[in-house]
Every structure is written in C-alpha cells, then in structure tokens.
Image (cartoon, rainbow, N blue to C red):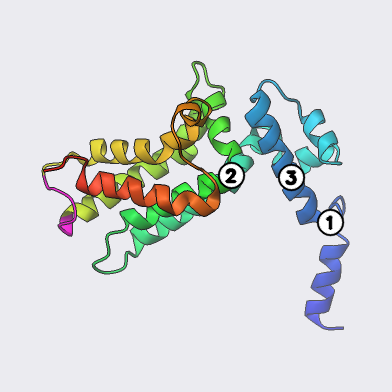
C-alpha cells in the first residue's frame, strides 16, 4: 500500500467528520446568508439555520464554532473573493494599468450575484447598534477601504485622476456610487429606472466609472 493511499484512508476515517462535507458546509452558508439578511443576527438561531439546511446545530459548531463564526464565514464567502483579488493586484500590480475600473466592475458584479449581501450589511452593520459592525469593520471594510484608497493613489500617479483629489474622499465617493444602487434598491428602485440583474451590471458599472472619471458637467 502506498503512502498516498494510507493518507487517503486516514482522512476518510477521521472521527466526527460528516459525509458530504463541502455540500453541507455550502448549504449552511447559503441558508445563513438568507436568514441573516432577512431577520438579522439577533433574529435567527443556529437551530433554525441548521434545520433549514437539513443539518444539526452540532454541524454548525463543527464547521464554524458558533453563531458569530458562521456570520463571519458568510461574509468571507461572499466578499472574500473580491478582497483577495484586490489585495493580489495591490501586491503585484500590472505595470501601467489603472486598476480602479477592474475593481469597480468586479465589486458591482459580486453584489449583483449576491443580492442578500447588501441587506445583510445594512441590517447588522450600518443600522444603529449594528451587532456585527466591529466584525465587518475589522475583517472586511478596513481591507477594502484602504485598498480602494491605494488604487486611487495609483490612478493619480498614472495621470488618470487629478493630483488635487483627496484619496480618502475620492475612494469614499467611488464606493458610494458603486454600492448605493444595491443598498438603496428598496427605495431608489421604486422611483428610478435601473436594473441590478447580473447581465445588466456592466452598463451600470460603466456609467459609474464614466461619471467618476469625467463628471457630469457639460463643460
């Protein structure tokens, strides 16, 4: 018997490891995102999430340790890919490329493909006394915000943006333009005609980038 075969059988015999490992974990994340975005962190129990996912509370503890760990895993599952790409291009940026357009398109596409995420953030992060504000700030917002600021500085160095712009305020304006169509959809969508369907996001992203780079003045 080869060493590889022995290692494989040892993994298969690991005590307490549920069968269908990745499927169960993904199902728990899917249900948790839906329940947290609808009812908030305080408004849903791990028992409810487990039952809806066809699992048990013990499985939530096995994969995520506790309810907060599950919430953090939901955010990481939804936002982690765009943050990882942002950090990757910051550490090894393609020479001469302004990376802000790539980030904005990717971020808006991610939000369109995960429509429950904006509701999740509004309910438990932005609302007064948001239960998960510190978690989101330390684990996600600080990484994303500083990353966008660095991309603004890079665009300035490449001559794509004006030198007199404050990088923090420019990052704030760009993120506001990119995110508000999603978090404001319950109201703005009733009075303004725009689509957040994934296949239409390119149009919205191009409008956002054009307005940010070129302004709205006729002059």
Q: Residue at x 32, y 58 (%)?
A: 99
Q: Residue furthest bottom?
A: 1
Counting residues from the N terminus, which is met first, the one under dot 2 or under dot 1?
A: 1
Q: How far apart are marks 2 and 3 (CA)?
A: 22 Å
Q: In this view, does 17 lie to the left or right of 91?
A: right
Closer to the chain start, of discs 2 and 3, is 3
Looking at the rendered image, the quarter that the N terminus falls into is bottom right
Q: Position of residue 187 (x, y in %)?
A: 49, 25
Residue 118 shows up from this direction: yes
Residue 83 seen: no
Q: Residue at x 47, y 50 (%)?
A: 201
Q: Which mark is residue 197?
A: none
Q: Name the residue under label 2.
A: 114
The residue pinned by badge 1 equals 20
Instruction: Give the residues drawn in magenta, as a range.
Output: 157-163
- Give the mark nearest the N terminus, 1 or 3: 1
The question of residue 30 being in magenta is answered with: no
């Amino acid at each position: 018997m080869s060493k590889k075969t022995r290692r494989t059988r040892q993994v298969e015999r690991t005590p307490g490891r549920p069968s269908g490992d990745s499927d169960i974990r993904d199902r728990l994340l899917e249900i948790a995102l839906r329940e947290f975005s609808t009812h908030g962190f305080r408004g849903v129990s791990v028992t409810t999430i487990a039952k809806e996912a066809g699992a048990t509370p013990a499985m939530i503890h096995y994969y995520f340790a506790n309810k907060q760990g599950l919430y953090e895993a939901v955010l990481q599952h939804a936002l982690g890919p765009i943050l990882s790409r942002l950090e990757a291009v910051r550490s090894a940026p393609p020479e001469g490329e302004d990376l802000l357009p790539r980030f904005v398109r990717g971020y808006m596409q991610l939000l369109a493909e995960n429509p429950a995420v904006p509701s999740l953030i509004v309910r438990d992060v932005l609302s007064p006394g948001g239960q998960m504000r510190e978690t989101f700030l330390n684990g996600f917002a600080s990484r994303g915000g500083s990353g966008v600021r660095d991309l603004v500085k890079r665009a300035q160095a490449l001559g794509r943006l004006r030198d007199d712009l404050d990088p923090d305020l420019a990052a704030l304006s760009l993120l506001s333009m990119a995110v508000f169509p999603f978090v404001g959809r319950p109201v703005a969508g009733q009075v303004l005609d725009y689509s957040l369907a994934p296949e239409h996001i390119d149009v919205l992203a191009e409008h956002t980038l054009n307005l940010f780079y070129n302004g709205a003045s006729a002059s």
